[in-house]
Image (cartoon, rainbow, N blue to C red):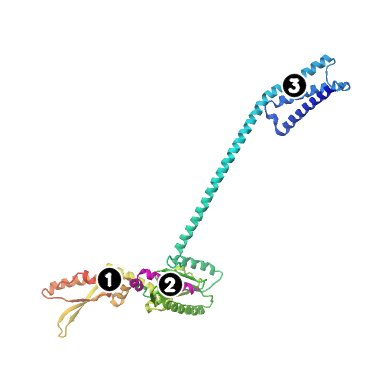
Amino acid sequence: MNELLLESLVALTAFAVLWTLYYSMMRHKVESQPGSRFLIVGFILLFISFLIDITDNFPSLNQYILIGDTPTEAVIEKGFGSLIGLLFLAVGFHRWLPAVFELSIAKKNINKLNSKLGKLVDERTSELSEVNQQLRQEIAEREKAQNKLDKQMLHDPLTELPNRYALLEYLEHERLRSSAHPNHYAMFIIDLDQFKAVNDSLGHAIGDKVIKSIGNRLAFNHRSEDFLGRLGGDEFVLVMSMNRDDPQSAALQTYNNATTLIELVAAQLKVDKHQFNLSACIGITVFNYGGSQSSEDILRQADIALYNAKEKGQGFFSFFQPEMQQKAQTRLKQSKELHDALSNKELFLQYQPQVDKDGKFIGMEALLRWHHPINGIVDPSNFIALAEEIGIIDKLGRYIMHMACQQCNDLASSFYPDNKLKVAINISPSHFLHCLLYTSPSPRD
């Protein structure tokens, strides 16, 4: 009985091993390992041998088992089957065990590599995290620097008000917005009168404080939806939306606003220990975006109106009129022609005799004339003021003095060898500031 139980247990063990190998072959592709098939065949043969041993105890089952007719043949067959099975198992284990060991070693190596790779990944992740943090800081610093540059590019550093570039951007933005909501606008260019005297007498540090104070005063008294900026120097610009469809109503509102601005600047101002009573001239243009005028055109119109207001005196404002632009264009053309006249020597002198009470000749007065290539002889009253305005009066004065001295020198040599020849020359007050009388040649006695 014990022998039967043992044989049955061995047979069941062989069957379990056989089933495990088969299941692994089907599910985990174990047959790809060397020696797997030999192991399966060997366990099959052993299982059959053990199964035959079990059936020996049950003669009624012998008819189902292929076995020798005699006991000797049966022993031989069972022994032969077990021997063949053991041989297959030996060959199978001979091939399979090294592969298993290699797999085991490979698995350990893979685990080591995975562990090492995990550490490297963690280290790299930590490094990338630090680099990412540094990049974020650099990006934040760059954004901060870019915002600072943008502010410097679009804002005046002294008053921190928007500058000319910001004004042009604002006008273009309003142009796009007005396509959906048409509106009238008014631009005011505010120029402080005689502000150079403040800088010359008290220094630029006080002048900067005055400019900043005026900027703060204007900023405090303008609407948030309006544009207030500084164009540079002592010029400010204010653009207001009129919210009026009627041009006359918009012009009336603009007139009232200009009067308020004049009074606002004229209010007494105290800076440090100094008190100032300033005034300003204002150039105004009322516009909408219905026409083809550009932002530069609008700014130019207000600038032309400012020039017209300054011609009237201090504390005036002027609205832009189309004829002002024509006048400005004419002035620009005359300025170029006067520059060309100096270069082309179109200016010449006429001399008017001077006599005493007895009618005796005592000298001459040099009178400047301009021989214009188109307009003929031009009287100095038509271009001397222009020369002072465009800043060439000193150059013109030197030109006159050199010409008068040269011509009078030739005249004195020929007709007045022993007497003095007196020549009167009209000069500008600015000549005294540049010491022109001391640096120019003198006529021969």
Using the rendered view, name the quadrant where residue 318 is placed: bottom left
Residue at the bottom extreme of this rendering: 357
1 vs 3, front mark: 3
Foreground of the two, 258 or 319: 258
Which residue type carries mark 2?
A: Ser
> Is tag 1's residue or tag 3's residue first in the polypeptide sequence?
3
Which residue type carries mark 1?
A: Asp
Q: Which residue is mark 2?
A: 213
Q: Position of residue 156 (x, y in %)?
A: 43, 66
Tell me where the magenta segment starts and ends, as one range. Answer: 197-222
Which residue type carries mark 3?
A: Gly
> Is tag 3's residue or tag 2's residue first in the polypeptide sequence?
3
3 vs 2, front mark: 2
Q: Is residue 322 above or below residue 81?
A: below
Q: Which residue is mark 1?
A: 394
Using the rendered view, name the quadrant where residue 422 is placed: bottom left
The dot on residue 239 is none
Q: Position of residue 30 (x, y in %)?
A: 70, 30
- Give the distance between the C-alpha atoms of the residues marked 1 and 2, in whole angstroms: 36 Å
The dot on residue 85 is 3
Query: Is residue 301 among the parts visible in the rendering?
Result: no
Query: Is residue 39 among the parts visible in the rendering?
Result: yes
Foreground of the two, 224 or 212: 212
Name the image quarter holding the N terminus. Answer: top right
